[in-house]
């Protein structure tokens, strides 16, 4: 599939879509408290998406059953919300949401601590993962490569003693949820697809506190760390513009 560059008009449509994702994530963040279930977060997100006039991007995608992915502790990505999965003090939960508005997709993720007693090592994991996202975003400029984005993420994560997941990567986004190019969270500077004006990338570091390996659970969606260590995930949609990176989901 060729890489599709977007016009300024299309990027503005994607920004409007991205603002809805941001509002949904801010609403759900407030609800990620001890004793809430991940299905509570799901119901709130579905309601908010509808109120804001968009459609969920994930629900029905390859038969995925929900509008959110909620991945708790050692779950990396694609955790399925459930009334049986109750959040506890000291947990962390990754909340990943996508919507489509006027034919244009947006996709973003945050990882939030549950309660007020997050261990220092987990606070550091969240700070480093989010920090690595912004280091990747800084590289999303015309003439750079996908490898520059991935290398920036990887270097920052590994310099802080953590590891990036390699089985799952970021992606192009536009009139489809997943477009070319793939955007790994590791790489070699100068390698991979060249970034051009109008490209829109979903950059999404997934970072493990322990080893980088992942495995899939029997539901064929939920990915967990191989060694049982905790994992964090942050994501923004970013347009490559002549004025530098433009974050569409903040």
Image (cartoon, rainbow, N blue to C red):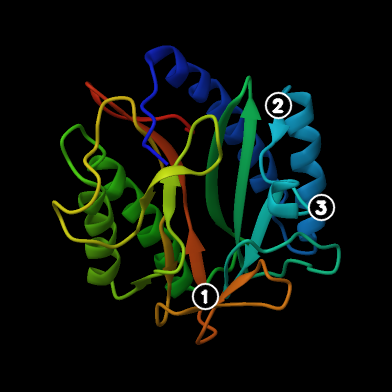
Q: Dot 1: what SS?
A: loop
Q: Dot 2: what SS?
A: loop
Which residue: 57% across, 56% down?
112
2 vs 3, front mark: 2
Q: Position of residue 103 (x, y in %)?
A: 61, 24
Give how far apart the Cα atoms at labels 1 and 3 are: 22 Å
Whether 196 is drawn above or below 225: the answer is above
Q: Earlier in the sequence, mark 1 or mark 3?
A: 3
Give how far apart the Cα atoms at labels 1 and 2 are: 32 Å
Which residue: 47% across, 70% down?
122
Q: Position of residue 69 (x, y in %)?
A: 66, 55
- Residue 40 got which mark? 3
Q: Which image quadrant is residue 211 in?
A: bottom left
Q: Position of residue 153 (x, y in %)?
A: 29, 57
Q: Is residue 31 left or right of residue 154?
A: right
Q: Which residue is mark 1?
A: 230
- Residue 54 got which mark? 2
Whether 190 is drawn above or below 121: the answer is above
Q: In this figure, what is the number of numbered marks?
A: 3
For the question of whether residue 67 can be seen, the reply is no
The quadrant in which the N terminus is found is top left
Which residue: 42% across, 76% down?
209
């Amino acid at each position: 599939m060729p890489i599709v560059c977007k016009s300024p008009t299309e990027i503005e449509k994607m920004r409007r879509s991205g603002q809805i994702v941001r509002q949904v994530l801010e609403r759900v963040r407030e609800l990620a408290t001890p004793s809430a279930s991940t299905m509570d977060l799901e119901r709130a997100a579905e309601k908010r998406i509808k109120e804001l006039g968009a459609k969920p991007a994930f629900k029905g995608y390859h038969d995925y059953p929900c509008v959110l992915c909620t991945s708790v502790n050692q779950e990396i990505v694609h955790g399925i919300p459930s009334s049986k999965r109750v959040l506890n003090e000291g947990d962390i939960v990754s909340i990943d949401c996508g919507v489509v508005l006027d034919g244009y997709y947006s996709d973003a993720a945050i990882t939030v601590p549950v309660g007020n007693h997050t261990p220092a090592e987990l606070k550091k994991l969240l700070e480093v993962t989010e920090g690595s996202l912004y280091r990747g975003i800084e590289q999303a400029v015309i003439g750079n490569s996908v490898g520059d984005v991935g290398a920036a993420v990887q270097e920052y994560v590994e310099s802080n003693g953590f590891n990036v997941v390699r089985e799952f990567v970021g992606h192009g986004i536009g009139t489809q949820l997943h477009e070319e190019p793939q955007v790994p969270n590791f790489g070699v500077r100068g390698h991979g697809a060249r970034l051009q004006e109008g490209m829109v990338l979903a950059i999404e570091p997934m970072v493990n506190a322990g080893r980088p390996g992942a495995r899939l659970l029997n539901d064929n969606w939920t990915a967990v760390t191989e060694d049982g260590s905790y994992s964090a995930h942050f994501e923004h949609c970013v347009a490559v513009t002549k004025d530098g990176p433009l974050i569409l989901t903040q």
